[in-house]
Every structure is written in structure tokens, then in C-alpha cells.
């Protein structure tokens, strides 16, 4: 399978030297042993990487068959999606192989050994352990009983595996386009990271799957009202779904289920619509109309392109056309 390397605008390493490869990849991921199955083979390492707040995404290929021994990852989970070739893993007593329909999710507190073949190219998602545990606790609404441990093999042919694959590939493609994880980081980036981790926790079997499933009761109307009131009081702030759930005094799963059942939308869709309605009012109803950029920022949007797109989808025209319509109406009034 032929593919273009991801994140070529963010190169980390190009080398044929084994020691340089080990040192550079260790600096970005974790310390590890790196060896070649055939010392006469030609190494050709390509490593690109982009970092968000709690998650980094990597494109990595070695161009030769290599043995990788990272031992314990310790501070992060590592989700690997194969783009070409195969890799064999020993992890938690299992021996697994990545291929086009199966990825690997390595747990931080279990050792692993890996063998990449010469054609193997992968996307690696490095997820901070502390962030995943924070999201897990927000989903369940209770302290975790211990470390979160996932089933290692991620089967992309199952319904849950397909959701995981689509979500993470969409993230990689957004990074590739420069839509996310560029500086300065925004609330949009934080939401992407939260959504990815939530997808893993809800779609991949783990030792807390039963706790997450039980945490899906519907909230009371007054809890939903508190959530909405909190949104409207903080429209210009970079609030997250965790903030909204905390204000409503419910866990995130309950909040999401309740919004879908009662309002027919997710909490973040409701927040975005409230921000858009505020922007529409500012552009079309006030006497001293602010600029489109000032309106976007004061309504909680940090990306003008996305604001314009969302605005057009909701109201059928661009934000600037609201200003133009109002100015035309004023000119007509003044002429009478």
C-alpha cells in the first residue's frame, strides 16, 4: 500500500543511523532499546510529530526490520494504527500482529516488545496517562478503582473499532491540514483530545467498561437547566464539557445522554449554538455593530474560519452579510 507520509511539515528525524534513531525517538516518546534483525539491511528512518496539550501524534517508519523494546511506557498510553506493513507485539502476555484491520493499544503499566517489518509505517497516538484518567473519572463521576487497562488489540472490523479508527484518522487528517494542534492551542484542541479519549474509553473494552456503562442515567431537568445557565454565563470563555458537567453536578456520560434525549443535541452543540445566537444578535440587533472578528471572539470563537462556516450553516448567510443587511437598513432609514 502506497501512502504519503503524514505531518511532513513537522519533521523530527531523517536518518540511516541506528543510534541516532534510538536517541531521537526516545526523546519524543520514551527510552527504549532498538536493534536491527539484519545488520546488513539499510535503515531509513522517517519520523514526523505534532504535539497538543495532552496528546501527540506521530508518523514513524524505519525502512528495515527492527526490534523495539520500550519496556514499561509509564506515563502514557500508545495507540498504533498501521498504514502499511506489519508489526508483531508481545504485550500483557499476548502476541499480536497489526495489519489493515487491527491496531494496538499499549497500556503504560505493562511491558511490551515490538518487531516492525521493513514495510511497516504507523500512526502513533501518545496519550498522557493523567489526562486519560481525568477523562475516565469525569465519565464515571467516581474515583477510579485503579489503573485503566484496555484490551490490547483494537479490531477495526467491529462497530466500536470502526468508531475508534474513524475518530483517530479524522484527527490525523485535521492535523495534516493544519486545522488543529497549531500554536497557540485553543479550546477546540482540548475538545478534540477529550473526544478521542472518550471514544477509546467507551468503545474499547477495559477494566472500567462496566463502570462507564452504569454511569449513563438521565439527568434531572434542573441539572440540565444548570448546565445551560452555566453555558450562557460563560459564552466567551474556553469552557469544556467537563466544566459543564461539574456545573450541573452530574458526570459527563449522564450529561451527554440527557442532552441527546431532551434537547436532541450534544452539550457542545448546544454551547456552539448559544454562541452563534449571541453573535447573530450582536451583528444584527445592536445599534453599534461590532466587527465580525470582535463578535466572534466575544462570543467564544477563536477561529474565524470555523465561526464563519458555523454561522452560515445556522443562519444561511455569512456573518458579514448580517452587518451588510443592517447597514443597508440603517441607510434606508436615514434617507427617509
Image (cartoon, helix red, strand yellow):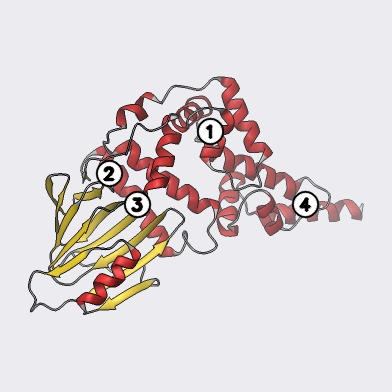
- Residue 239 in view (yes/no): yes
Asked whether the residues under the numbered discs 4 and 3 touch, taking CB atoms below 8 Å apart as contact, a structural biologist would say no
Q: Residue at x 73, y 55 (%)?
A: 323
Q: Nearer the viewer, mark 4 or mark 1?
A: 1
Q: Secondary structure at mark 1?
A: helix
| x 41%, y 46%: residue | 130
Picture disc at residue 75: 3
Q: Which element type, helix, strand or loop, lies under badge 4?
A: helix
Looking at the picture, how far across and down is residue 222, in whole percent? 60, 21
Distance of label 4 from label 3 (alpha carbons):
54 Å
Labels 2 and 3: the sequence-earlier one: 3
> Residue 162: which disc?
2
Residue ID for mark 1 = 245
Dot 3, crowdedness within 10 Å: few (<14), some or many (≥20)? Answer: some
Of tags 2 and 3, which is closer to the observer?
Answer: 3
- Residue wearing tag 4: 326
Label 4 vs 1, first from the N-terminus: 1
Q: CA distance from mark 1 to mark 2?
A: 27 Å
Q: Earlier in the sequence, mark 4 or mark 3?
A: 3
Amino acid at each position: 500500500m502506497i501512502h504519503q507520509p503524514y505531518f511532513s511539515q513537522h519533521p523530527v528525524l531523517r536518518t540511516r543511523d541506528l543510534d541516532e534513531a534510538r536517541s531521537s525517538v526516545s526523546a519524543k516518546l520514551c527510552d527504549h532499546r532498538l536493534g536491527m534483525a539484519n545488520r546488513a539491511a539499510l535503515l531509513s528512518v522517517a519520523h514526523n510529530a505534532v504535539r497538543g496539550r495532552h496528546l501527540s501524534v506521530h508518523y514513524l517508519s524505519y525502512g528495515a526490520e527492527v526490534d523495539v523494546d520500550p519496556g514499561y511506557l509509564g506515563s502514557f498510553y500508545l495507540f498504533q494504527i498501521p498504514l502499511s506493513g506489519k508489526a508483531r507485539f508481545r504485550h500483557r502476555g499476548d502476541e499480536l500482529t497489526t495489519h489493515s484491520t487491527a491496531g494496538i493499544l499499549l497500556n503504560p503499566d505493562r511491558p511490551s516488545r515490538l518487531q516492525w517489518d521493513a514495510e511497516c509505517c504507523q500512526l502513533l497516538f501518545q496519550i498522557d496517562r493523567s489526562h486519560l484518567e481525568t477523562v475516565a473519572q469525569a465519565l464515571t463521576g467516581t474515583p477510579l478503582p485503579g489503573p485503566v487497562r484496555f484490551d490490547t488489540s483494537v479490531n477495526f472490523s467491529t462497530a466500536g473499532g470502526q468508531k475508534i479508527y474513524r475518530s483517530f484518522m479524522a484527527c490525523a487528517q485535521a492535523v495534516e491540514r493544519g486545522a488543529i494542534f497549531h500554536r497557540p492551542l485553543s479550546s477546540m484542541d482540548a475538545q478534540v483530545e477529550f473526544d478521542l479519549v472518550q471514544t477509546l474509553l467507551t468503545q474499547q473494552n477495559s477494566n472500567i467498561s462496566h463502570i462507564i456503562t452504569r454511569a449513563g442515567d438521565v439527568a434531572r431537568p434542573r441539572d440540565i437547566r444548570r448546565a445551560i445557565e452555566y453555558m450562557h454565563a460563560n459564552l466567551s470563555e474556553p469552557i469544556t464539557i467537563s466544566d459543564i458537567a461539574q456545573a450541573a453536578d452530574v458526570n459527563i456520560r449522564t450529561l451527554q445522554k440527557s442532552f441527546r434525549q431532551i434537547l436532541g443535541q450534544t452539550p457542545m452543540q448546544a454551547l456552539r449554538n448559544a454562541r452563534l445566537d449571541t453573535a447573530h444578535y450582536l451583528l444584527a440587533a445592536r445599534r453599534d455593530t461590532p466587527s465580525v472578528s470582535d463578535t466572534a471572539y466575544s462570543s467564544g470563537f477563536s477561529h474565524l474560519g470555523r465561526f464563519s462556516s458555523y454561522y452560515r450553516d445556522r443562519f444561511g448567510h455569512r456573518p458579514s452579510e448580517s452587518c451588510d443587511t443592517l447597514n443597508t437598513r440603517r441607510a434606508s432609514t436615514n434617507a427617509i
